[in-house]
Image: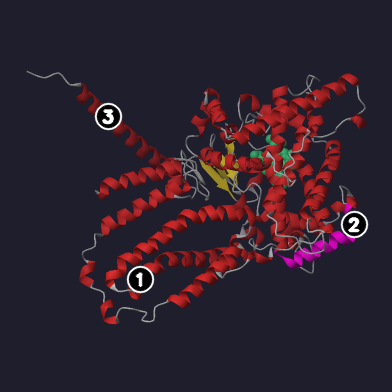
Amino acid sequence: MELPISFFQILDHWLLISFTSIICYFISSAIYNLYFSPLAKFPGPFWAKISGLPSCTFRFRHNGVLFASPTAYPSIYGTRANVKRGKFYEVWPRNPQNHNTLSTTDRMVHARKRRILNSVFSEKAVRSAESFIIKHVDRWNQILDDSGSNDWTESKNMTIQTESLVFDIMGDLAFGRSFEIKEKAENQFKVIPHTIASYMQFMYPITQSPMLDTWVWLKPRGLDTILDKLSPKEVKDYYAFVDASVLERTKQEEEALRKKTEENDIRTDMFHYLFNAKNPETGKPAYSPDELNAEANLLIIAGADTTSIALCSFFFYISRNPQAYHKLVHEIRQTFNSADEIQGGMKLWSCTYMRACLDEAMRMTPAGPSELIRQVLPGGTDIDGHFIPEGVMVGIAHWAILHSEDVFGDPSVYRPERWIVDDTTGVTTEDVALAQSAFQPFSMGQGNCVGQKLAMLELLITIGRTLYRMDIRMAPDDSLGTASGGCGGAQTTNQLIVFRVFQGLGGSGLLALPFAIIPEMVETRRYPLYVSFTALAFVLGFLFGPLFGGEEGHKVKLNTSSLPIAVMNLALLIIFIPAGFPNIKSKQRTIQFKKLKEIDYIRSTLVFTTSGLIVSALQEAGTAYAWSSALVIALFILAGLCIPIFL
Ligand code: HEM
């Protein structure tokens, strides 16, 4: 008698079909992406081509191409480009009510919102913002120069200094209240710039992963609520601060309208212009309370991090290039008679070398180094002679183009002179035109930076006033050690890479050396004891090193403090090295070649590969890439596949 098919047989059957279908799907889509996709002709790494994993070459995912030529700019970002913003932009808003001009992907809706925002950033508004900027820069200068004498102050961490200045300015302009982060006193907002940066770091890999569409779909369906609940306390405090400030400023503006207060007696910050913006079609207020909140928030996100990166990178490069530094200081101190005279106007714009130094810093370390992704619309588009069909993601690889040898010749060198036509330096009009065509820090077309005039004003006033009032220099304790010092003092990316290689060699040598030395130093019977002590030293080092290093990194430069420890170690070694070193005789060192045959090479390779994959996944997850990112998941899957083969 035939037995009825059991539940488990059916389950087996379906599992087999599902599993085979999934495998077939992945293999066929990989073959399609590799050989039949319209993008098949573009070069790019194998995994990027078939899977959508990110990389920096041209075909950076299965449906995306990046360009690194100046001529591609207008076709991608120009006013007439047949593209719209990609899904990338929809990931960022906190909730559906918090959509702003930047996160709007629909072209028509964006154009409408953008017209309003243009009116908010009028000449008059930018002029009004100047007094707020000056107030904060002057106070910042007082805080920086805290030595109380003509001596050099202690070293300052300019990343923290510049971001605190810019956040305070933006808070004052966008919400009517400065965060007061730059002040020495503790306050709960000091962590906000880092929290925003960590949020970006967490979200960015998601925007690059194949789960982007699902993420955007889930956002209004509960994901936003979950993320809101999971937000750290600092983020919640920040939102509460923003909401309260917007509410208070709204009340002040409503009161001023009711009382018909004169414009001279009103606080004319950016919020004032946002609040009073009118919809050109209806003549009514342009923003609802939610939209007002979202747009004010956008100014912080778009205006703070970007400007502080530009400022910080300026101080970094100028302090490492004495020639450029002296030329710049000479220009500033010759053009103005006092620091107070430094404000927006012809005199400030006439400082061509200052502008060149800033542009060069923004080129070397762009605030937005990655692509600003656009999605090709129906009908496709032509970029650099390539037809790109509808739906494909395109963008400029900004860091790559700003470091292109074809355009800049010596892209890793900080050379402000490249931006100024001059017979003595040999820089021609064509050189400058070519460099400028590749340098679009504020992007171009309809979606370019609406705050660029404000940003330039803020940057030039800060640089001008600061360098008029004080001298700056690279922290003197910045380049101790050999390879580490080389890294600290590297003037170009290539130098940095070379010194990093030596640093890495030194580091790995340090790990291997004790185990190689022990057999030389002690008798065989004492190996276990000495190996255990050495291993214990490593364990303690790995455990406490990051704790002390992390704490110390807030206060002092790491490589300063490592020198005394190195000197102490050397002294201990000289004193305690045993007299009979090395302990073993040379005849004992012969290699037994027959032993080599006993090694299981395949399994050894698999062990290295699997542990390499797992370690890479654990290192990248939660830092450069999210746990849920395609890269991390793929590394775990590959490691998982290696284990059965090993067994
Ligand atoms: C050095 C400083 C700055 C740089 C390099 C910069 C760069 C940019 C870039 C490249 C974009 C286009 C983004 C995209 O298409 O995804 C952008 C957009 C934007 N920026 Fe800036 N920005 C800076 C400062 C500012 C400041 C100070 C503000 C305002 C106070 C601001 C407000 C905005 C806004 C509102 C947008 C969105 C425009 C739109 O969607 O139409 N930015 N910025």
Tell whether label 2 touches label 3 (CB within 8 Å): no
Disc 1, ligand 1: is the CB inside 8 Å? no
N-terminal of the pair, mark 2 or mark 1, is: 2
**Among the two numbered marks 3 and 2 on one chain, the one whose residue lies closer to the N terminus:** 3
x, y percentage for residue 321?
A: 71, 65
Q: Which residue is mark 2?
A: 336
Q: How many marks?
A: 3
Could you tell me if the residues under marks 2 and 1 are in contact, i.e. CB atoms within 8 Å?
no
Q: Residue at x 34, y 75 (%)?
A: 520
Q: What residue is pinned by disc 3?
A: 15
Q: The residue tagged with tag 3: helix, strand or loop? A: helix
| Residue 101 in view in this figure | yes
Task: Give the crowd class for mark 1: few <14, some 14-19, many >=20 residues within 10 Å.
Answer: some
Q: Is 322 one of the magenta-colored residues? A: yes
Q: Position of residue 140 (x, y in %)?
A: 78, 49
Q: Residue at x 48, y 67 (%)?
A: 506
Q: Amino acid at mark 2?
A: Phe
Residue 263 place in picture, x, y as percent: 91, 29
Quadrant of the drawing holding the N terminus? top left
Question: What amino acid does circle 1 point to?
Answer: Ile
Residue underneath mark 1: 518
**Distance Cα–Cα, label 3 vs label 2:** 78 Å
Helix, strand or loop for disc 1: helix
Sequence-wise, the earlier of marks 3 and 1 is 3
Classify mark 2: residues with Cα within 10 Å, few (<14), some (14-19) or many (20+): some
| Label disc, if present, on residue 81 of the rendered structure | none
Q: Nearer the viewer, residue 332 or 355?
A: 332
Please determine whether, in this image, residue 213 is positioned above or below residue 442: above
Q: Give how far apart the Cα atoms at labels 2 and 1 are.
A: 67 Å
- The secondary structure that dominates the magenta segment is helix
The residues colored magenta run 320-339
Q: CA distance from mark 3 to mark 1?
A: 55 Å
